[in-house]
Amino acid sequence: MIKKAVHENLGEIVQVLEEVKVHMLNKGIDQWDEEYPNRLILAQDIDNCEAFIYEDQGELLAYMTLNEKYDDEYNDLDWKTSSPFIVVHRLFVKPAAQGRGISSKMIEYVEQYASICSYRSIRLDAYSLNNTANVVYLKKGYARVGEVYFRKGKFYCYEKAIEGS
């Protein structure tokens, strides 16, 4: 169900992303726009072998990027673990498929991936007004370590240590 994305997936990934952007705006969440994320950024994720998709019966339902890159704003936070860590970016689920536990499956995949690859922790941020995302991360045992400000406003930063690392 979860696998690395390839360029043949790009059109469908962009289509799902556009559905997500409209859905979030309709819920009053002005997190993403034409500037970020966009087709070029997603293509670069694929080029870098950092893009992952969730498919069910051939339909693309979710997307995320995993890498070790982070914004400078992360440097000022009180992270509980040291390097190496992996960062989750651009996790989204097709609106019609939301509420089916797909984001939880994506997060569980990240945790398994991080453990196999000997990362000490997983780090990520979530838009402060995206209550659904923030609740999911807290339920999954991620600790809020602070907040940063990006172009769209305040984002909460989370971390989860990997057991056995």
Image: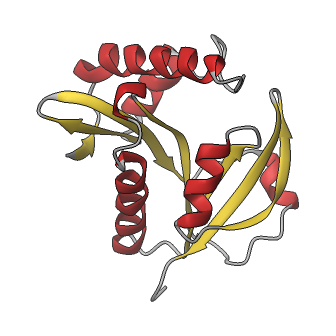
Residue 102 x/y as whole percent: 35, 46
Q: Could you tell whether 134 is left or right of 16 in the image?
A: right
- Tell me: residue 165, above or below residue 114: below
Q: Could you tell whether 125 is left or right of 8 in the image?
A: right
Q: Residue at x 67, y 76 (%)?
A: 82
Dividing the picture into quadrants, the one containing residue 4 is top left
Residue 60 x/y as whole percent: 26, 29
Residue 3 in sight here: yes
Q: Could you tell whether 10 is left or right of 65 in the image?
A: left
Q: Residue at x 59, y 46 (%)?
A: 133
User: 146 or 25, which lies in front?
Assistant: 25
Q: Could you tell whether 7 is left or right of 157 in the image?
A: left
Q: Residue at x 65, y 15 (%)?
A: 33
User: 157 or 28, which lies in front?
Assistant: 28
Residue 127 x/y as whole percent: 72, 40
- Tell me: residue 51, above or below residue 59: below
User: 85 or 109, which lies in front?
Assistant: 109
Dividing the picture into quadrants, the one containing residue 158 is bottom right
Residue 38 x/y as whole percent: 54, 17
